Amino acid sequence: MEHDGVTERLLNRTVLITGATGFIAKLLVEKILRLQPRVKRLYLLVRAGDQVSAEKRVESEILQLQIFESLQEKYETNFSSWFWAKVSPVVGDVSLKNLGIGNADLAEDMVKETNIIIHMAATVNFRERYDTALAINTMGVKHVIEFASRCAKLELVLLASTGEMRPEVVAAYFFPMKRISCQITRLFDCFQISAIVNLDKAGIMLEKPLHQYRSNDGRLDLDISEETAFAEAKLKELVCSNASEDTIRRTMKKIGTQRALKFGWPNAYVFTKAMGEMLAYEHRSRLPIVIIRPTATISTWKEPFPGWIEGVNTIDTWVTNCGKGHMKFLVGDVATAIDIVPADIVVNAMLCIVSCHPQGPSDMIYHIGSSMRNPLKISELIHLICRYFSEKPYINAEGDLVKVKQPNVQSAMSSFYELMDIHYKVPLQNMLRSGLSTAIDHDRYNQLKREYNVTVAVAEAYWPVTLFKGRFDDSNMQRLIAMMNERDRELIPCDAKFINWEKYLMETHIPGVMDYESREAARARL
């Protein structure tokens, strides 16, 4: 059965978007405005001290982006007034009741007007404090649902199982460990919860809910209110003992990891996001809720233009470090598929769900990825990365062309660590024994040590994905795509099977990543 179409669905609708300054959310805002200029209003919930600050944040982090150039050309001098007539920044915080909206009149207007809620706000730091991760990733869902329950004209609540994180601006010559941490977090941030909680499994991962209020393996009871009370009690105990802020931060981070491991999740981020999904699933019978689980999101394929990226994310750590000759060893099963998906495919899939998700009881979980319909093997990805830099070598800070060799890919962490001993640890120890008598000796030692640290950090964080042998069923998403009319298939293409990976990676994605890197390096030198 074909539906009326996405433009009709958005006509005169009011949409509330949380996490509005995230990578995917920015593209979503642009696409909605370009697709349906007669959308009634977009409420963008942002953290800010006051309304003026909220508007300035939306202006600097959204309005002034390159992705809005086509709309600027269309509306010319009227663009700014048109944009602000459609977009309303809202000072808020999903960790608070009523979404932290202090303006009671505004909150009431939003409750009366809102038709569609798209919740994308999250903290994605793997080592986040447990109390903070619970407040945003778990209780944030609860507060969105409570707000949605009051909306008189509510048609859909779309919950993103991932969040967004803005990368830090740092020098691009060699990634500091802090930046590597950001990039690693982004990989798992965009890699769906299903992947992370099924790392020891193989085969097809279905679009199904987690064990409701149980541990990952289903053996232990999981009470979210008890987890919240536990975190609050631990925090109060630390404060009462006059612990320093640093001690409080480190302790609450440690507790988050401990609680996650107890219930079968690898870290506080995934654990608190999983609890958020459980809260949402509880309300599926009384609210029109859907959950999307995108896989690793990369640069845009086509819209609003090819190759737009914000930060070095997911596979891009491999791209940049291999191109610069810094990463000679990787961990992965070269025969397995790495599930990546362009950002505009994710945005279009969200709009397909908004347009076509059936009313009443139905499937509520949608995987958005490529491993089922158009798998890209890790061996193919590595080959394309090396081929790109063989044809277009990276020029380092000294003006030299960097020669790229095929990296040594290990299929197990044990053999990887053995190679690390041979190629890094032993040489580093020998250099120390011989003495670092000159500045050149110190430079060589520091460079080799940085290379070692980065290689190990990336391998230890990426191996759950690069050794993962599962693929992600997207049957629910494919059923919706089948419902789309021909016009929507052109307006919001969201089927990854049509991506030519070689063409996209060689001509769009890798150049886009390196262009971003060069801009950030230039900015860091200012």
Image (spheres, rainbow, N blue to C red):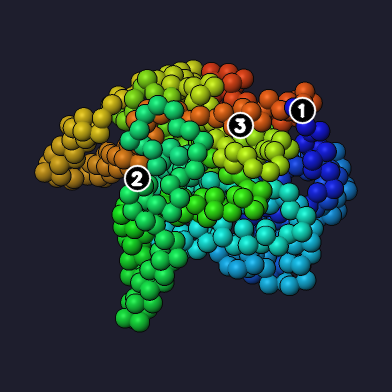
Neighbours of disc 1 within 10 Å: few (<14), some (14-19), many (20+):
few
Q: Secondary structure at mark 1?
A: loop
Q: Secondary structure at mark 3?
A: helix
Q: Which residue is mark 1?
A: 2
Q: Which mark is residue 217?
A: 2
Q: Which mark is residue 477?
A: 3
Amino acid carrying mark 1 in the image: Glu
Q: Secondary structure at mark 2?
A: loop
Residues under numbered marks 2 and 3 in contact, where contact means CB atoms less than 8 Å apart: no
Image-quadrant location for residue 428: top left
Neighbours of disc 2 within 10 Å: few (<14), some (14-19), many (20+):
few
The answer to whether residue 343 is left or right of residue 234 is right
Amino acid carrying mark 2 in the image: Asp
The mark closer to the camera, 2 or 3, is 2
The answer to whether residue 465 is left or right of residue 432 is right
The answer to whether residue 389 is left or right of residue 412 is right
Residue drawn 88% across and 47% down? 77
Image-quadrant location for residue 142: bottom right
Amino acid carrying mark 3 in the image: Met
Which sits earlier in the primary sequence, circle 2 or circle 3? Answer: 2
Q: Closest to the observer: 143 or 177?
A: 143
Q: Position of residue 153 (x, y in %)?
A: 78, 55
The mark closer to the camera, 3 or 1, is 1
